[in-house]
Image (spheres, rainbow, N blue to C red):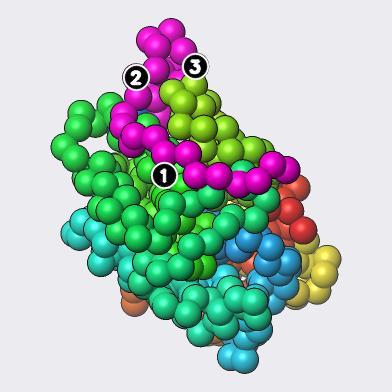
Amino acid sequence: MSEAKFIDYNLKLIEPSFDSLLTDLIIELDYLRKKPLGGSTHPRVFFQLKHIFHTLESIGSARIEGNNTTIAEYIETKLDDTQNASSNIREIQNIEKAMEFIEENIIDYPINKAFLRELHKMIVKDLLPPPNGEGDRTPGEYRKINLKINKSNHLPPDSLLVNDYMDELLDFINKDDSPKYDLLKAAIAHHRFVWVHPFGNGNGRTVRLFTYAMLVKTGFNVNVGRIINPTAVFCSNRNDYYEKLSIADTGTTEGILEWCEYVLKGLKEEIEKIDKLSDYDYLKKEILLPTIAHSLERQYITDVEAKILKRVVEHQVIQASDLKDIFQGKASAEVSRQIRRLIDKKMLMPEVEGGRKYVIRFDNNFLLRGIIKTLDVKGFLPVRD
């Protein structure tokens, strides 16, 4: 690898040619952004999937930076509610909390310096700074030192210039351009952030959350049922990610266009793939029923629990009377007790708070192992163990 050097270039919007693949991707993603995500999957079920994919997103973002925690290891910490987490686990937990922060605040607040500072502080919280950990000596503060990026020919700008470059970047993303440029701006801004490398450490994790925030801000609204995982674009092949960043580092129009095409192509594929889960027939047949079978086979659940859960999955929403044939000869109170046990074990939950109709729950119990296994088999996981 040649010696890293700083190559300055102007931050600006670019215009892909009308007949390019990139233009096609922008049009197709704009359609997905505006398309109402109806689907037949119950919202109480679908939003559990969203939480799972946010967990996977967080694991993937940490893995890009060298965190070797496996999906299985992290899922076990969620099931055991581990209090004394290792630094690797804490790093992933920080990313999950930062994603929640974005969803709770991004619609009402601008993406500005204060927002980025808060994201970065959350990312490095309670982590030792390098070389012993993935924290930062100055959480939430732009770097006051010059640094190099591992395995990169790009040398980030001098620390004295960081504030000006970041002001320029934030002005760029907040400029009132036509919505047709939103996705291009998100891709360009992701690269520019990495190019500036504004923080002493944690830049990769922060920029991927920054990208998530921009996508939600521009209309890929996860709060109405869409799941987006931009990190999945980058973590499926880490070498491709770094290679495309390097091409964009040249600052040429061709290099930036190639980077944008890489980002938007991956994003479109991820959105279309995960949107399939909004079709309940698909979710039931390909994910939920195999999950119950897997959990029974591993003895995470009993035969009776499996029968109840299969019935719930078949109907999507059930009430006590739908289970009477499973408990022939038993009093109604016994059915209610079985339902209560599954609620206590976090395998069922009321369709509405305090209601007497129920849907399956799998986001925080031993069914989660089966869900992850089945999603992996069906090619939904952005990272592989």
> As rendered, which of 41 and 252 lies closer to the eye?
252
Q: Position of residue 23 (x, y in %)?
A: 41, 18
> Separation of disc 1 and disc 2 at Cα?
17 Å
Residue 120 image point, x, y percent: 41, 69
- Please name whichever residue, 5 or 217, is drawn nearer the observer in this view of the structure: 5
Please report whichever mark, 1 or 3, sits nearer to the chain's N-terminal start.
3
Q: Which type of secondary structure does the marked residue at label 1 adopt?
A: helix
- Residue 361, above or below 244: below
Residue 15: numbered disc: 2
- Specify the segment rendered in magenta: 1-29
Residue type at mark 1: give it.
Arg
Q: Can you tell which of label 2 and label 3 is closer to the viewer? A: 2
- Tell me the residue at 30%/59% (across/down): 163
Name the residue beneath numbered marker 1. Answer: 192
Secondary structure beneath dot 3 equals helix
Q: Is residue 26 above or below residue 238?
A: above
Q: Which residue is found at the position 41% from the left and 67% from the top?
A: 143
- Picture coordinates of residue 85, whole percent (x, y): 62, 86
